[in-house]
Image (cartoon, rainbow, N blue to C red):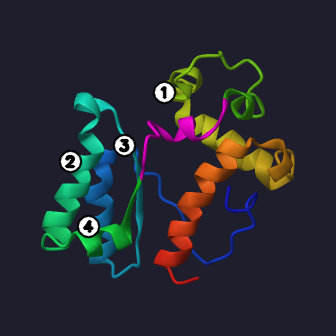
Amino acid sequence: MKKILNRGGDYQFVPGIGVRQANNLISLCIGYGLEWLAIIDDDPTEGGKESKKKFDEIKDFVFDCDEVKTKEKVFVLQEVVGIENMFTYDDLKLINTTVSKVVDKTKAVGKNRKILFSKIFFEKAEKGEIKKENLSKQALDNFGKAFDFIQIGFSL
């Protein structure tokens, strides 16, 4: 999406493999003196409170309970349960034409196929097979918000 949205900046993405792993990745970044930002989805686990719980943990343990500083480094994708749900069903069909049509895109992709799906998306975007004009306004808006956060957070 960085390429598709034509967003500049010298930064890399590290998949967290679930919101519960965020602390580990943040600790590694801090330990190695790396600049970091975290973007987490609105995870439905335990009644939709897992992301809020993780945000509060980061706020307490990394930022000494300072909510303003936490919000500068941690972005919660409001009402987006699973990054796949940032896309529409038609967007997912660009990656795999046999994807099943269900409301929850995470189920459509398949929990165990998320990494494969993202790899295929990346490869198709790199080759120019998936372009900005192919994607829905919903996907572009959702990812645009995340990249706006990144650009502000890294002062790009």
Q: Amino acid at mark 2?
A: Lys
Numbered range of the magenta stretch: 77-88
Q: Is residue 73 left or right of residue 148?
A: left
Disc number at residue 112?
A: 1
* Pointer 2 or 4: first along the chain: 4
Q: Earlier in the sequence, mark 3 or mark 4?
A: 3
Spot occupied by residue 125 in the image (x, y as percentages of width and height): 78, 50
Q: What kind of element bears circle 1?
A: helix
Q: Using the image, tell me which numbered label, if any, was put on residue 89.
A: none
Q: Could you tell me which residue is drawn at 58 percent across and 21 percent down?
A: 108
Q: Judging from the image, what secondary structure is the residue with disc 2 in?
A: helix
The label on residue 27 is 4
Please say if the residues under marks 1 and 2 sit with CB atoms less than 8 Å apart. Answer: no
Which residue: 27% across, 73% down?
A: 68
Mark sitting earlier along the chain (1/2): 2
Res 18 label: 3
What residue sits 27% from the left and 58% below the top? 24
